[in-house]
Image: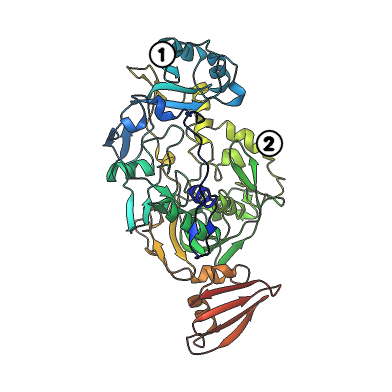
Amino acid sequence: MASVASASAAAAATAATPVVSTASGESTTPKIPQKSSKQRKKQPSKEDHALPSDPEVIWPPPYVIEDGLRRVEPYHFAYRTWVKERWRGRALVDVFESEFRDRPIEYYRECMEKGSVLVNAKKVGPNHILKNGELIAHICHRHEPPCTADPVQVLHEDDEMIVINKPSGMPVHPAGRYNFNSVVEVMRSERSRDFKAYPCNRLDRLTSGIMFIAKTPQAACKMGEQIMGRTVRKEYLARVIGRFPDGEVICNEPILQISPKLGLNRVRANGRHARTVFKRLAYYPPAEGQGNEAKPGEAANGRPWRNKQGYSIVRCLPVTGRTHQIRVHLQHLGHPIENDPIYANYKVWGLNLGANDGDASLNSDEDIISRLSRMGKEDVAEAVAYYDEMVDEYYKKKAEKMSGELCKECDTPLYTDPGSHELSLWLHSLRYEDSGGAWSYSSPMPKWALPPDGMNGPVEVGDMKELVVAVRDTNPELVSADILEVQMGPRFDDLQIGYSRHGDLLYFWGCGRLAIFGHPPTETWTLGG
């Protein structure tokens, strides 16, 4: 789901500087008294402790493209962190033992003794007592997991913004085990070392589709304000289990995060308000002989299992932007995304797959969290917020993901290549558009949404009018003049004046503009023009 770019922090910092207007009307920034050179104390910075393994020194990224995967040759890298308040006065080795548990303490002690764990770029040994302002660095031989070799497709570019079609299986930012295998680093490698990317919306690693990459913090802030103002319409495509119902389906169920550690969400009455509009684009029954026949007594919410076979391509308009909103709402409706490793997993949710279980009467939160934590390689892909951390810990205990080989340089156990289920989720960000009609960008339909061999079906998606009209009374910010023209007839033009009532909203239009008066009357929106 989309979220506001962090670049808004830069704008906030700029806005914090006071501006004074003079008698002539000019704006000036007041001078701030400066400390003398004796008063100023040089603050340490990461640049003061530059290391040969810093990311900026490694250029170009050591990519290798093979077997449909983008691999990164192992390289030396420095993980760095400032000493936190709770670490002050403690021995370096004690902090590593309590805070960094991905390796045995014997490994870290050896690194400290040989100088690959440094403090302020100096070898200090494991018993060094940490102080405020010190910078800890751990130089290691880094092994990144491979990701898809599909390109980052540019759909539009101007002086401020790049609109891309993000491939599935590639994270947006460097995070966790991923660094060079991320959207921003791949784009930087294709443009220039000095290129800076400012993502304006966020997609999970497994999700593909439209993303906005600003070229400046100001452009990112501008787009972020539009997204926050909810005047940007978003449409996704999902491939779900079974035959999705006809017509527009609106899900207004609130969503609650039941596990902050896992980032797991469920429909709950005490959750945050959420609304999604769905409409089936196509249904494809199972190939002859592949569908499961219903067994006696087997049903899900009264629907025999034969009705759960085949799959539908569903259009999704998320009006709100909760974490995993589309996935959770589809699960609640009984049609989860077909290859969703979390919300469509029988081992976690049971035969009902979590449908219509808003009161947790079928599966308690504790049961779901417990089952999810026990999942292994064949069941899990990165589908929750802290997946990397969770499964890494799991694999260290179970050793199910290791290839059995060791790195010749650092003796790190090597990972096997990711399976197809670890590189894709059948959820695609298809379209973003301004509700006022100022701009619109769409991406191609993914392969999994196209008709299967031997079947006929849609190969493109129409506009969003049907989806928007379904919530026009409750979400007028999504309504534009062209949509109302379809609903109200040819009277809506630059020369005529008219009005129409829809629910609690009263629409007045004329001279190419539209005013919407809500309840109470003080709520007014002006669109079009």
Q: Tell us which disc is closer to us: 2 or 1.
A: 1
Residue ranking furthest to the bottom: 496
Q: Which residue is mark 1?
A: 115
Secondary structure of the residue carrying numbered label 1: loop
Decide: marks 2, 1 in contact (CB < 8 A)?
no
Q: Residue 50's spot in the image, x, y percent?
A: 38, 26
Q: Amino acid at mark 1?
A: Gly
Q: Is residue 247 visible?
A: no
Label 2 vs 1, first from the N-terminus: 1
For the point 51% across and 73% down, the residue is 480
Between 21 and 101, which is closer to the camera in this rendering?
21
Classed neighbour count for the residue bearing mark 1: other residues with Cα under 10 Å, few (<14), some (14–19), many (≥20): some
Q: Position of residue 168 (x, y in %)?
A: 40, 46
Position in image of residue 504 (x %, y %): 68, 75
Q: Nearer the viewer, residue 301 or 25?
A: 25
Residue bearing the label numbered 2: 366
Element on which disc 2 rests: helix
Residue at 54% over, 66% down: 246
Left or right, 258 with reference to 312: right
Q: Is residue 484 left or right of residue 166?
A: right
Q: Amino acid at mark 2?
A: Glu
**Image quarter for residue 251?**
bottom right
Camera-side residue of 58 and 258: 58
Q: Position of residue 426 (x, y in %)?
A: 45, 50
Q: Which mark is residue 415?
A: none
In the image, 116: left or right of 12?
left
